[in-house]
Amino acid sequence: MFDIVFKDAVIKDGISTFEGDLAVKGEHIAAIGRGLSGKQEIGLKGKWLLPGAIDVHTHMSLPFAGAVSADDFLTGTRAAAFGGVTTIIDFLSQRPGEGIRESFSRRLSEAEGRAVIDFSFHACIGDWNDRVKEDLPWAFDQGLTSLKVFTAYKKAGLMLDDGEFFEMLEATREVGILPTVHAESGAVIDRMIDRLGAIGQTSMSAHIDSHPVFTETEAVQRICHLAKAANSPVYIVHLSCGDSVPILRREQRHGTRVLAETCPQYLLLTDELLKSVQGHLFSCTPPLRPYEQPVQLWEGLADGTIQVLATDHCPFNRADKDSWNGDFRRLPMGLPGVETLLPLTLGKCLEFNVSPDTIIRSLTSIPARIFGLYPRKGSLLPGADADVIVFNPKSSQRITAETLHGANDYSVFEGWPIQGKPEQTYSHGRLMTDQGKFLGQAGTGRFLPRLRSQTIF
Ligand code: URP
Ligand code: ZN
Ligand code: ZN
């Protein structure tokens, strides 16, 4: 006898759609079929049953420019669960001189006992030193099978120069760790920021002007060249420019093993918002882009040039953003998004000629494969964790910070009407959220050691 049977659901995993029943036994998916029976039977006629989404890019409790991102592992993962996200991958935070071990134990103690859904980490390396190199095999054994580096943020001590970057690609390739990259031309951007600052230009327009589109496309092209030369796979995070898409498409066709993620803010918002009175509330890096850029991001998502949707969830409260005093260099950069990821992308995709199945894959099985979690996560196969969501495509909602569940006090999508709503979220077969009510408990989320990337090595 099964424990739970979801009856008469539209079961979708982004590849196929099956109208029938899905059974859960204990913490796992046990069967898909018709006429299944269980101790608890839940009728889902007309509703979609999906694998829980995986947000592979969040920053809970991230210190930035004197502030700390508003969501910690409890509030952020609770908000995630309301939005149909059942797994997050956040980041370790290396201090200068450290290897990977220290930041792992620090971050684990922040998440354990608080996270309500499962979580993992990318190592994050600003200081490419000998201890990091020594720790790479150890990190792999712990299941930290990806790391993030930056080609920008030199003043914050995060940027790797091209030599370090190339060496990092060779070293991670040897160990089987997937390198992920924040792709911006840091040196050019810093020069432009200084130049504009010297003539008193520090407004949000200066943020836009110091981060022109070519500072992403140049970095994307350079990263592809270096990855190909190092015979290494590489994954580009938060791709923001449509103009980067043809570069990636060409590189992929010529054998460069490059993957990319984009985020709802780059698909749906533009830099006009940065010029508005409250423009500083929309500050992130890379910045929101000119109106012509999102089109090719949607096209890249549709044709598979971009594989993953994630959020870069890094929310700061108004008070933290408001203390910028007209100088964008003082802003903690980042936007909220973990709770709106799935409803926004599923709700908006048809307007941009992208199918719901593509969105579902980009939120579930593809990130699971890229980051070594498949089929335990991102799938509805028997044996997978029973992380499932009930999505009602007929229900509509209006996004507003008042009804979102994170600790952040505003949303960049305030007032947006959205078709479709995640109504219930299950993690390991336990009902976590039900029509706006939280039924979970702090600390039920577990650290996920991950396998080697299953797509690109
Ligand atoms: O503005 C952003 N993206 N903040 C988070 C840090 C990062 O670079 O991902
Ligand atoms: Zn970044
Ligand atoms: Zn980020």
Image: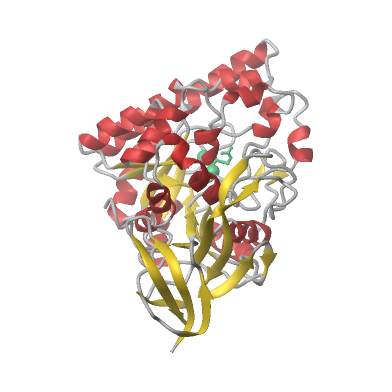
Outermost residue to the left: 254
Position of residue 437 measured from the top left corner of the image (x, y, whole percent)? 69, 65
Depth check: give the residue in front, 208 or 344.
Answer: 344
- By what rule are the colours in the image chosen? secondary structure
Depth check: give the residue in front, 136 or 202.
Answer: 202
Q: Is residue 241 visible?
A: no
Quarter holding the N terminus is: bottom left
Which quadrant of the view contains residue 317?
A: top right
Q: Is residue 436 left or right of residue 132?
A: right
Outermost residue to the front: 45
Compared to residue 365, the image places residue 290 above or below, namely above
Position of residue 184 measured from the top left corner of the image (x, y, whole percent)? 47, 30
Residue at 30% from the left image edge and 58% from the top image edge: 454
Residue at 63% from the left image edge and 44% from the top image edge: 336
Residue at 53% from the left image edge and 54% from the top image edge: 90
User: In the image, ligand 1 is in what quadrant?
Assistant: top right
Q: Is residue 191 left or right of residue 279?
A: left
Position of residue 98 measured from the top left corner of the image (x, y, whole percent)? 53, 52
Q: Is residue 191 left or right of residue 7?
A: right
Q: How many marks?
A: 0
Depth check: give the residue in front, 79 or 236.
Answer: 79
Residue at 40% from the left image edge and 37% from the top image edge: 353
Position of residue 400 measured from the top left corner of the image (x, y, whole percent)? 70, 45
Q: Is residue 282 left or right of residue 98?
A: right
Outermost residue to the bottom: 1
Q: Is residue 423 visible?
A: yes
Compared to residue 203, the image places residue 166 above or below, namely below
